Amino acid sequence: MLKLAIVLLLLAMCASLFSGLFFLVRDEGRSARLANSLTLRVVLAGLIVALLVWGFHSGQLLIPGAA
């Protein structure tokens, strides 16, 4: 379940990245949509890091080869 949440957040982050690129090209960086896309991407990155830390701490995610 945790891995699925991480993958979905990564996909949402990629979608935000491409929407930011679209807004940069279309609006030439003059609209608030580009800033909103960047804000969303930073929030998603924070959530991904938090889920990774929680997963390693709780033992739901394991490092291969670690004993």
Image (cartoon, rainbow, N blue to C red):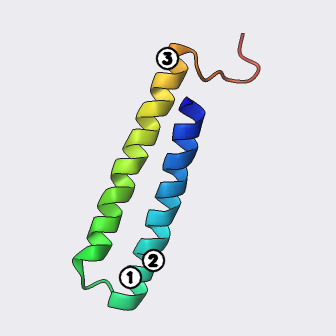
Which callout, 2 or 3, points at the residue further toward the start of the chain? 2
User: Which label sits on residue 4?
Assistant: none
Q: Position of residue 4 (x, y in %)?
A: 58, 38
Q: Where is residue 24 in the image (x, y as percent from the top left)?
A: 38, 82
The kind of residue tagged 3 is His
Q: Count every numbered label the image shows and give the total.
A: 3
The crowd level at tag 1 (other Cα within 10 Å; few <14, some 14-19, many 20+) is: some
Question: Considering the numbered disc 1 on the image, is that residue within a helix, a strand or a loop?
Answer: helix
Residue located 39% across and 90% down the image = 26
Discs 3, 1 touching: Cβ within 8 Å:
no
Residue located 34% across and 49% down the image = 43
Residue picked out by circle 1: 24
**Where, by quadrant of the figure, is residue 3 drawn?**
top right
- Kindly report the distance in space between the C-alpha atoms of the residues bearing marks 2 and 3: 35 Å
Residue picked out by circle 3: 57
State which quarter of the image contains the C terminus. Answer: top right
User: Which label sits on residue 21?
Assistant: 2
The kind of residue tagged 2 is Leu
The crowd level at tag 2 (other Cα within 10 Å; few <14, some 14-19, many 20+) is: some
Q: Where is residue 55 in the image (x, y as percent from the top left)?
A: 52, 24
Question: Considering the numbered disc 3 on the image, is that residue within a helix, a strand or a loop?
Answer: helix
Drawn side of residue 51 relative to residue 60, left or right: left
Residue located 74% across and 24% down the image = 64
Discs 2, 3 touching: Cβ within 8 Å:
no
- Kindly report the distance in space between the C-alpha atoms of the residues bearing marks 3 and 1: 38 Å
Position above or below: 15 against 32: above
* Extreme-front residue of the structure: 1
Q: Position of residue 44 (x, y in %)?
A: 40, 49
Discs 1, 2 touching: Cβ within 8 Å:
yes
